[in-house]
Structures are given as C-alpha cells and as structure tokens.
Image: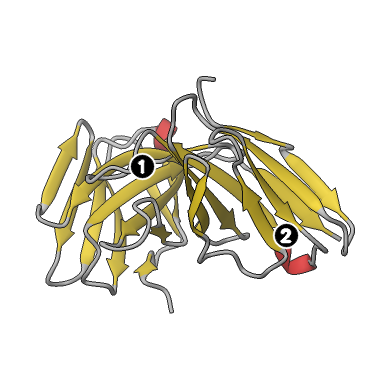
Amino acid sequence: GAGVSQSPRYKVAKRGQDVALRCDPISGHVSLFWYQQALGQGPEFLTYFQNEAQLDKSGLPSDRFFAERPEGSVSTLKIQRTQQEDSAVYLCASSLLELSGANVLTFGAGSRLTVL
Amino acid sequence: DQQVKQNSPSLSVQEGRISILNCDYTNSMFDYFLWYKKYPAEGPTFLISISSIKDKNEDGRFTVFLNKSAKHLSLHIVPSQPGDSAVYFCAARGDGGSQGNLIFGKGTKLSVKP
C-alpha cells in the first residue's frame, strides 16, 4: 500500500483481556518497528524486525508483550492480560533498509488502546 | 532519565514570524538527529534530519542547527504558516543497536496564529 496501515485504530479492552494489533508496512520495506506512545509523551521504542527476524526486543516492557512478523511483511503486536498502564497509542513504522545514514521511518497512524 | 529533552511543551507564534523549537540531549554518542511533525490522529511524519558531523541543514522553510558542545539542537521555521501547527518531536539515534531505535523527546506543540 501507499503507507503504513494499522488496525484497529481504536481498541477498548477490559483489564486482563488479550489484544492483538496489526501493522501492514509499506510494500518492500525490510525494517519494521513498534513504538509505544503514552499520553503526553514521545514515542518509545518497543521492538524491531528486519524481514522476519526480530533483531531487538529490548523495549518490550514485560513478557506480556509479544511481537511477530512471520513472513517478513505484516506484523502483529500482542499484549496478554492487559493492564491499565498499557493504555497508549501503539505506533508501527517501517523503512526500506537498515540505512547507514539517517534512517527515516514512515509511521502509521497508530492503534489507540484503552484498558478499563 | 530522559536522554532527549524538549523543555517547552508549547509555543505560539504569529503567522509570518519565525518559530524556534529547541531540543537538548545528554548522550554524546548520538550520531543522527531528526525532527518529526505530528498532526492529531495521524502518525509522526519525517521533517528534517542532521548528522552529528554537521552543524546546519536546511530544507526550504525549515533549518535545523546543531551545537554539539552544548548538546543542543533547534528547528527554525520561517516564515511560519498556520498549516505548521502541530506537535514537533525531536529524536536522536544512537551509534549502536537498531538503526531505527530512535529516542524521542516529549514534543512541543506549535500553534501558528493567522
């Protein structure tokens, strides 16, 4: 597609529910990133894929967070047993390559998760 | 501890004047700095970047200045237009780890009044 597509745009979950957030990156983009943006904060790095390989998951806040990209295109971020502190906008970004210069990421519009 | 700081949560400027958005950082190993612009309900969009080996980069109405000794960068928008009203994020990239592991500031909300 023309841009990075994320779904759902809005998700309300009861505490303890599992959620899955989908990201469809720009076709041909090798690198895919997930960021978490809490209210009033800047985006914070969660995890990074190069093709299907998850090369960095150092930003995942707990073992309740899991991300996959099995075929090197679409990615899913799964949050198990959601907690109120998980409420945030989850941003997906992709880039063509892992560049040596400024790695310009193209972001999706995000999935806003509200945990009640 | 925040490695990238945008100390002004908001800025209001008259149309046609200059907007100056500031950003401070603590890690001298950052090798690239980027500015992203974000409208409500949209994802951040890339605006302009600068390598740590340069002190200025210009693109149309947008200029980024880097002062490495002060660990400070600024984004100048001149002349400012109402369509520039958005939240501006400063981001930095470290020299190790994932190339896309950008560290963002909290953002500055710019309002350009007609």
Sort mark 2 into few (<14), some (14-19) or many (20+) by Cα contacts within 10 Å: many
Q: Nearer the viewer, residue B88 or A6?
A: A6
Position of B68 with respect to B95 (left or right) is left
Q: CA distance from mark 1 to mark 2?
A: 35 Å
Position of B104 with respect to B17 (left or right) is right
**Amino acid identity at mark 1:** Gln
**Residue drawn 29% across and 67% down?**
B24
Q: Secondary structure at mark 1?
A: strand
Q: Which quadrant does the C terminus of chain A fall into?
A: bottom right
Residue to which mark 1 is pinned? B14
Residue A49 shows in this picture: yes
Query: Are marks 1 and 2 in one subunit?
Result: no
Q: Pointer 1 and pointer 2: residues touching (CB < 8 Å)?
A: no
**Residue drawn 22% across and 69% down?**
B29
Residue B85 shows in this picture: no
Image coords of residue B48 (percent x, y): 28, 41
- Mark drawn on residue A87: 2
Image coords of residue B69 (percent x, y): 12, 71
Image height of B75 relative to B79, above or below: below
Image height of B114 relative to B32, above or below: above
